[in-house]
Image (cartoon, grey):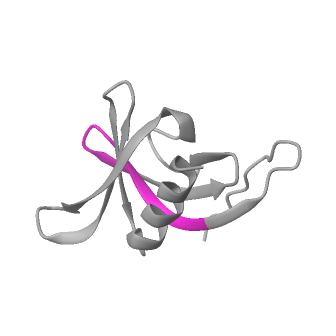
Amino acid sequence: MFKINLELKNNEIIEITRPANHFLGFEGVGGKIFITDQRFVFKSHAVNLQAHELTINYSDIKSVEFYNTLVIVPNGLKIILQSGKIEKFAVWKRKLVKNAIQQKLFK
């Protein structure tokens, strides 16, 4: 498979990593999410058309919600930002990911 590494900040600790797709338009960009003690990061693998890295500070997150991809698949996670922008992901064990992010919002 594709190895994806995250460059960490000083004293940053990765708490959870999960394979995920980040939806950009109609493309589900494959990669991995990283939940650290300092930030949320999605980093795509290099073979995507829209290869990218997305970093979201926890202070920029308003809420996290579930949704179903393809209307019926229970693997969607929406991160709603304070700005109103919504970032959508498909991720396995989405409850684990949602809970981890929500814990950061209430610190």
Percent coordinates x, y for residue 69 in the rendering = 21, 61
Q: Residue furthest top?
A: 83
Magenta-drawn stretch contains 107 = no
**Residue 57 visible in the snapshot:** no
| Vertical placement of residue 79 versus 66, above or below | above
Q: Residue at x 20, y 71 (%)?
A: 73
The chief SS type of the magenta part is strand
Describe residue 53's horizontal placement relative to residue 73 as left or right.
right
Describe residue 90's horizontal placement relative to residue 106 as left or right.
left
| Vertical placement of residue 31 versus 87, above or below | below
Magenta-drawn stretch contains 23 = yes
Q: Residue at x 80, y 50 (%)?
A: 12
Quarter of the image containing the N terminus? bottom right
Q: Residue at x 51, y 66 (%)?
A: 19
Percent coordinates x, y for residue 14 in the rendering = 72, 60
| Vertical placement of residue 79 versus 97, above or below | above
The number of numbered discs placed on residues in the rendered structure image is 0
Q: Residue furthest bottom?
A: 93
Percent coordinates x, y for residue 55 in the rendering = 58, 38
Percent coordinates x, y for residue 56 in the rendering = 54, 38
Identify the magenta region.
Answer: 17-28
